Image (cartoon, rainbow, N blue to C red):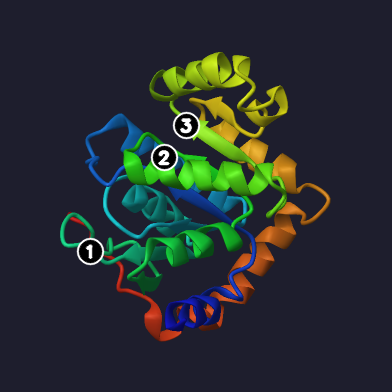
Amino acid sequence: MGEFVEGFEELAELGPAATIFGSARVGPEDEAYGKAVEVGRLLGEAGFTIITGGGPGIMEAGNRGAREVGAPSVGLNIELPFEQHVNPYVDISVDFNYFFVRKMMLVKYSQAFVIFPGGFGTLDELFEALTLVQTGKIRNFPIILFGSEYWRGLLDWLSGPMLSEGKISPADLELMVMTDSPIEVRDKVLASTEGEHSKTGHEERAREATREALGSNRRPRPRENT
């Protein structure tokens, strides 16, 4: 119960946000890392807070992109015996012991999911979002698979035996889209929120709503090598 309360208190005033998922086992030299930085940067410039799992890899890249353009950068970290630590580009950090609480926070405060290549945890988060949208538990929002080479096999399987055997409907496949373009990610997210918030409105809400929350939780910016 305490984790729910802490999460609600820290995140209640975030403003418009997009969540970036993906593998922790990706380094800065990986192409996917650079693409995730670009996605974080473009969505941040469009006025969105960037939320990630707070760890290394794709999560770090998304937070880094947000930091580079001065957008609010949030990390919802899970305590693990290996692999996970809060990356240096997180401004607001909330730690969780339980995956289900963390997943709820990732979904509750986001207007879009961008899913980069990842492992079991990434797939868990993807299918959680799909199930919640499919069953009407949350409103339909963009679920974007980034990296067609990685995700095409999954989509082929979903549109093959799962669809042909009636386990899902054709409409279920339309709950997600696939792309290799950071610009297309931004455009799809903005299009989905058109009429709810203007671009300027996004920027003002994201900055004003998080100013106080950043306060003492803001981490020092990493020094740049010169």
Q: Would you identify the image quadrant in which residue 159 lies?
A: top right
Does residue 79 sit above or below 30 in this rendering? Answer: below
Q: Residue at x 48, y 62 (%)?
A: 70
**Marks 1 and 3 in Cβ contact (< 8 Å):** no
Residue 126: where, in percent of width, then height?
49, 42
Tag on residue 64? none
Does residue 47 sit above or below 23 in this rendering? Answer: below
| SS under mark 3 | strand
Relative to 17, 73 lies left or right: left
The kind of residue on which mark 1 rests is Arg
Tag on residue 223? 1
How many neighbours does mark 2 have within 10 angstroms: few (below 14), some (14-19), or many (20 or more)?
some
Q: Mark 2 vs mark 1: which is more N-terminal?
A: 2
The kind of residue on which mark 2 rests is Leu
Q: Which residue is mark 2?
A: 123
The kind of residue on which mark 3 rests is Phe
Q: Mark 2 vs mark 3: which is more N-terminal?
A: 2
How many neighbours does mark 1 have within 10 angstroms: few (below 14), some (14-19), or many (20 or more)?
few
Residue 155: where, in percent of width, then height?
51, 21
| SS under mark 2 | helix
Relative to 109, 145 lies left or right: left
Q: Would you identify the image quadrant in which residue 197 lies?
A: bottom right
Disc 2 versus disc 3: nearer the observer: 2
Tag on residue 146? 3
How many neighbours does mark 3 have within 10 angstroms: few (below 14), some (14-19), or many (20 or more)?
many
Q: Would you identify the image quadrant in which residue 191 lies?
A: top right
